[in-house]
Image (cartoon, helix red, strand yellow):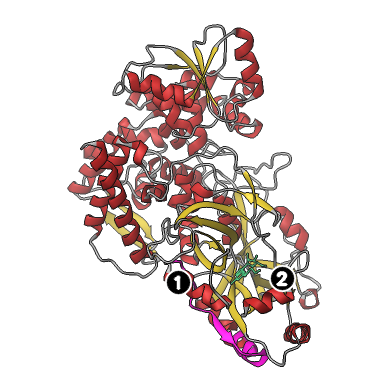
Amino acid sequence: MNPENAKRRIEELSDKVNYYNEQYYIYDKSEISDYEFDQLLKELNNLEKEFPQYKLPHSPSSRVGGDITKKFPVVKHEYPMLSLANTYTFEELEEFDKRVKKDLGLEQVDYFCELKFDGVAISVIYENGILTSAVTRGDGVQGDEITANVKTIKSLPLKIQNADYPKKFEVRGEVFFTKSEFEKLNKSREDQGEDLYANPRNTASGTLKMQDSSIVASRNLQCYLYYLLGEDLNIEKHEEGIKKLEKWGFNVSDSYRLCNGIEAIRNYINEWEHKRFELPVETDGIVIKVNSIKLQNKLGTTAKSPRWAIAYKYKAESALTELLKVTYQVGRTGAITPVANLNPVLLAGTTVKRASLHNANEIERLDLHEGDFVHVEKGGEIIPKITGVDKSKRSKTAKKINYISKCPECGTGLIRNEGEAQHYCPNDIYCPPQKRGRIEHFVSKNAMDIDSLGSETITGLIDKELINDIADLYYLKYEDLENLEFEAYSEKKGEVIKRRLLAKSARNLINGIEASKKQPFERVLFGLGIRFVGQTVAENLSNHFQNIERLSNASTEELIEVQDIGTRIAESLRAFFNDKMHLDLVERLKKAGLNFEIKEDNTGSNALNGAKIVVSGVFENFSRDGIKKSVKVNGGKLVSSISSQTDFVLAGENMGPAKLKKAEDLGIKIINEEEYLKMIEEK
Ligand code: IVH
C-alpha cells in the first residue's frame, strides 16, 4: 500500500474500531461479530507496524498498552482538584443545606445527587475531541501524568465521535475495579500462588501507577465520569454537563438524580443505603452538588473543598459474630495466612463466613481468644476485617489464640525472617501445597503455558506418585498416563470425584509438555517460582545474564546492578541457588531440553554489525525490552556497563548522570533515539 492510502486507511480503521468499542463498552451493543472486529484491529495493527509515522494518538491499539513509563511526569492541574467535605449524619447535611440557602439568600436550592464511587480520581483532558492527557489528583495542585495507562480503560473514549464538543475540555471521574473484575484478578493471583490484594481501591491506584501499560490493560479497569470543566461549555447546570458527557460517549453512572431540596436528598440517601450493594462497583456514600453553575460560582470554594458540594458517607456495615476457630493456609511460596472462621453472618449484601487475620501480629493486636465475639466490618474491602473483640462476651476460661509453630500441612517448623510479618514453611520441595502450588505455577499461562494440565490432574499425578516436582513432568510417558485413574476435588461440585485420563487427554498432555520446551528462558525462570521473582524481574534477569550459569553464579552485588532488583530479591535468588536441591532440579530440567539461555533472534537486519551497545534511559518508540530486542535483532550486542570496549551508548530520556559522565570520560559516542532509528532504517 502506498503511504498516502495507508494514512487514510489507518484513520478510517482507528475511527471504526473506536466506534465499535464505544458501542460495546458503553452501550452494550455488538454491531459486528467478534471475528470481524478482530479483523479490523489486525489490519490496523499491521498497517501501524508498517507505517508507524501515521499511528494516531487516539489509535485503539493503545488500549492494549505496551508503553513503558519509567517515571511519570508531574503536571499542574488547570483547575485545582479539590476534595469534598464529609458528613456522617443527616443533621450535618441539613446544616449544609441551611448554610447554602443562607449564603445565596434563597428559600430552596436544587441539588444534583450521585453515588460516591470508591476508586481513584482522575482528570482527563481532551483537545479537538482527542484524549491528550490524563493526570492523577496528586496533592490537588499537581499530579502524575499517567496517560498511557488511562488509555487502556476501554470505556473511556480516545476520540469523541459526536462532533459538537468545545476545542478543549476536562473531565473528572473515578477509576475503579468492578467487584467481579477484582475477584477475577484475585482468583488468578491465587491460582498463581501470589498474595491476594486486600481492596479494590488501593489496587486500582497501584495499577494506574504501573510502569508497564500492557499489565494495566490486562486488568480491565473501569471508570465513571462525573464532572465536566472548561471554557465555552455553554452550560448553566451541572446536570447539563453530565448530559453532554453522556452524549459524547462517556461512561456516566445512571444512579444520579436531581433533588429539589433536603427532603428529596433524604429519600435518595435512604433509597440507596442497601441498593448500592447491588451495583457493580464499591460505593461509600453519596455526593451532593448544587446544580446551578452560577450558584456554584457564587458560593465559591475554601482552600480545600468547594462550598457548593458535600459528601455523605454511609456507615461501614458491621456485625457481631462468634469466632469458631482459626485455621492456617499454606500458600505456594510457603507463606502462612491465618484465617478466622466465623459463625455465618449477613453483611453488606453477602454472607460472611471467614475473615483474614493477615499474620501473627494481627492476632496479637486483637488479643484474640477462643470463642470470642468479634466485630466484622466491610468497608472498601472485599474480604471483611475484624475490627475488634467484644470482651464483655468472653468467658473467664477462654484461652488465648496461640500462633502455630509447625506447618499445618507437613509439620515442618515455621520460620519468620527479621522484619517480616509473615511466617513461612521452609519445606518448599516436599510440603504438599507448596509442591502442588509450584507445579501449578510452573504450568500456568504466563510461565510454561501447559493448558492441558489442570490442577485436578496435577493433584492426581502427585497422588499416584508419578510426579514430585516440575522436572518429573518431562519424564512422563504416554503409557504412564493413558487410562490413569485418580481422585480429585472438584471445585464445581464441592466434592471429591473419580477421574480417568482418556487416550486423547493423555496425548494432549504429553504434547503440551513437549511443546513447552520451546518457551524462552525468561518464562522458564519465572516458572521456577523463586520467591519475589515475578514476570518482569525474570525478564530483566534473563536479558542481563543471558543464561542460567551466569545468573546462578552472580553475587548479591552483581544481582543488585540489574534494573528493578534490590536486596530482597537478590537475597532470595542467592538462597535459591545456594540450595543443592534447586541446582539438581535445574540440571534435570536442562537435560530434558528446556531453554536456560537466551536464543538469538535472526529476523532483523545486521545494521549494527556486532557493535557493543549500552542502552540507558527511557525511549519514546520502544518499551524497555523493546529497545533491547531491537538492538539484538539488528545485529548489535547488548552490554550492561560502559567500558572502553563499548562502541556506543544509546541514550533515551533521563539517562543516569553517572553513566553519562563515564561515557564522556572514556570518549564513547552517545547517540539518541532518533539517530538510532536512522541507523537501523538505512540498512
Ligand atoms: S464530584 C468538586 N462525584 O470523592 C467536586 N466526586 O472525597 C468534585 N468521588 O475527589 C467531585 N464519586 O475523587 C464527585 N459522584 C462523584 C464522586 C466523587 C467519587 C470522589 C472524587 C472526589 C472525592 C471526594
Q: Which range is magenta?
A: 250-269
Magenta run includes residue 253: yes
Type of the residue with mark 1: Glu
The quadrant the N terminus occupies is top left
Give the secondary structure at mark 1.
helix
Give how far across and how far down residue 248 sits, in percent.
43, 67
Give how far across and how far down residue 490 sits, in percent.
37, 61
**Quick one: which residue is furthest to the left in this view?**
503
Mark with earlier residue (1, 2): 1
The answer to whether residue 139 is left or right of residue 169 is: right
Respond yes or no on whether mark 1 lies under 8 Å from ligand 1: no
Give how far across and how far down residue 193 sits, in percent.
50, 48
Respond yes or no on whether mark 2 lies under 8 Å from ligand 1: yes
Type of the residue with mark 2: Pro
In which image quadrant can residue 89 be found?
bottom right
Q: Is residue 188 visible?
A: yes
Give how far across and how far down residue 675 sits, in percent.
45, 22
The quadrant the C terminus occupies is top left
Give the secondary structure at mark 2.
loop
Q: Is residue 320 visible?
A: no
Image height check: is 538 above or below 590? below
Residue wearing tag 2: 306
Q: Ligand 1 sits in which quadrant?
A: bottom right
- Checking the image for residue 246, the label placed there is 1
The answer to whether residue 140 is left or right of residue 187 is: right
- Checking the image for residue 204, the label placed there is none
Frontmost residue, 143 versus 385: 143
